[in-house]
Image (tube, rainbow, N blue to C red):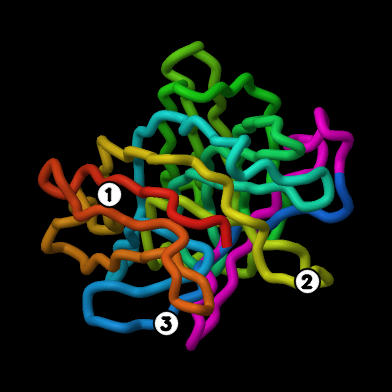
Amino acid sequence: MSIAHRVRPFVLALAIPVAALTSAAGGHAGSPGFGGPAVSARTAFADFSPNWGGYVASGTKFRYVQATFKVPKLNCAKTSGTTKNPDLVGEWVGLDTVTVEQDGISGQCANGHEEYAAWYEMFPKGPVYPGLTVHQGNTIQVSVWYVASKHEYRLILDNLTNGQGFTKWERCGGRSCANSSAEVITESPGKSVAAKTAYYPLADFGTTSFSGISVTDAAVQRGTFTSGYWRVTRFVMDDSADRVKAAISGLTGSGSAFQTYWEHAS
């Protein structure tokens, strides 16, 4: 998934495969994309993006990010979606905002039916869906670790509720992976380039609570989002009319926790 900025766009892309999230509804043409945020900076402490909501650490090179969250209950009666135009949401952690090395879960509403999937992605390669069982209320722990000695990334997802999970070792998917940021994000997935609108409607996920957030930089300095080793930016998700799509709480737990709140589908 990549962040899209309004003023200075830089795109990271992760697309949910059709089969992973639309099998019950019969599939649809094209795959939603997760990637970087579109952002326009309004203050020194917050940016506004149409597709990302959460926190991003930057200002140095990073090697590790981890967070824990519960899979949100989607309100598919309110944001019902359709087979061709489902309402979607992604919850994930990752490194970088250009190449994007990330893993997490996605949820969709299509014709009032909710469905969830676990995934990982090494952009520009497509996302991979290992076929794990994911339900609302499951506790998910995810991490991305760059192992310099191997020049590889270790992506881990553990469903602490049912014991399922994956550990994947992957090389950089692009020409170079800068490890220039570490992020914990709720995302409104993007549509394909051919789509007439940029993003799918944001599924009503209610509230997502992230906790246990840990970040480590290349110098092996470990902390949370309030650590003095790096700077942190809060991304509020809003549309082109400046209407908030997902609100973001302040940091709690000494910088190791925050919440995202659904406000509007688009």
Instruction: Give the number of the disc on residue 154.
Output: none
What SS does tag 1 mark? strand
Q: Amino acid at mark 2?
A: Val
Query: Tags 2 and 1 in contact by the CB under 8 Å rule?
Result: no
Q: Tell me which segment is drawn in magenta.
A: 1-27
Give the spatial CA distance, label 2 vs label 1: 33 Å
* Mark closer to the chain start, 3 or 1: 3
Q: Nearer the viewer, residue 15 or 128?
A: 15
- Residue found at x 60% / y 33%: 118
- Pointer 3 residue: 40
- Residue 101 in magenta stretch: no
Q: Residue furthest bottom?
A: 7
> Are there few (<14), some (14-19), or many (20+) residues within 10 Å of tag 3?
some
> Left or right: 67 with respect to 192?
left
In this rendering, does residue 120 appear at all? yes
Q: Amino acid at mark 3?
A: Ser
In this rendering, does residue 146 appear at all? no
- Pointer 2 residue: 193
Per the picture, the main secondary structure of the magenta-coloured stretch is loop
Q: Amino acid at mark 1?
A: Val
Q: Nearer the viewer, residue 11 or 257?
A: 257
- Residue found at x 31% / y 83%: 42
- Pointer 1 residue: 215
Q: Nearer the viewer, mark 2 or mark 1?
A: 2
x, y percent for residue 244: 42, 65
Q: Nearer the viewer, residue 47 or 154?
A: 47
Q: Residue furthest top?
A: 162
Give the spatial CA distance, label 3 vs label 1: 25 Å
- Residue 12 in magenta stretch: yes
